Image: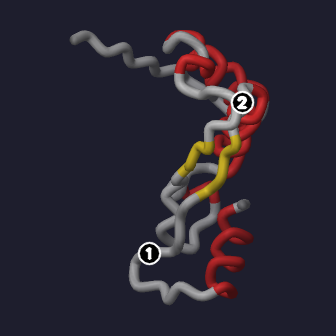
Amino acid sequence: MTETVSIRKAIDYEKSLSVAIDKVLADLGGIERFVKKRDRVALKPNLLVFSSPSKAIVAHSRFTFEVFKRLIEAGGEPFVIDSPGSGIPFTKNSLKSLYRLTGY
């Protein structure tokens, strides 16, 4: 079986990222190939540590937002599944702090 992989370069997190995501999805046959109406789709952005997006440790919130938009446009119901790692106690306040610092 042959699988298709697509890699596109985005030089910024504004317009370039959006275009790159659209090209990757087109290369793979469109998001509709993977997501049907009312599909619940979990996104795990790797929120391991309290880190700003500029450090590139966690998935950039802009990337996740752009993927969310496309999932919604395809009729999917996206949601984030993730919690702090690296020995960070999981509490409602720690999760809120993690989301705030990482841009989520």
Q: Give residue 39's position: percent from left, percent from top.
A: 62, 37
Label 1 CA crowd tier, 10 Å (few <14, some 14–19, many 20+) = few
The reply, left or right, for residue 79 in relation to residue 5 is right
What x and y, as percent, mark residue 75? 74, 30
The disc, 2 or 1, on the residue closer to the chain's N-terminal end is 2
Residue type at the position of mark 2:
Arg
The residue tagged 2 is 70
Residue at image mark 1: 85
Q: Is residue 16 above or below residue 82?
A: above
Residue farthest toward the front in the current orientation of the protein? 38
User: Where is 59 relative to 88, above or below?
Assistant: above
Which residue is found at the position 39% from the left and 18% from the top? 5
Contact (Cβ within 8 Å) of mark 2 with mark 1: no
Quadrant (top left/top right/bottom left/bottom right) for the N terminus: top left
Report the residue at 71% width, 30% height from top.
Answer: 70
Label 2: how many residues lie within 10 Å, few (<14), some (14-19) or many (20+)?
some
Which residue type carries mark 1? Answer: Gly
> Looking at the image, is 75 positioned above or below residue 79?
above
Which quarter of the rendering shows the C terminus? bottom right
Q: In the image, 59: left or right of 65?
A: left
State the SS at label 2. Answer: helix
Query: In this orientation, which residue lies closer to the viewer: 61 or 37?
Result: 37
The percent position of residue 9, horizontal first and vertical second, equals: 55, 23
Residue at image position (61%, 21%) is 31
Q: Secondary structure at mark 1?
A: loop
Residue 34 locus on image (x, y percent): 53, 25
Cα separation between marks 2 and 1: 28 Å
The figure's colour scheme reads: secondary structure
Check the image and report above or below for 99 versus 4: below
- Asked whether 5 or 29 is in front, the reply is 29
User: Residue 71 falls in which quadrant of the image?
Assistant: top right
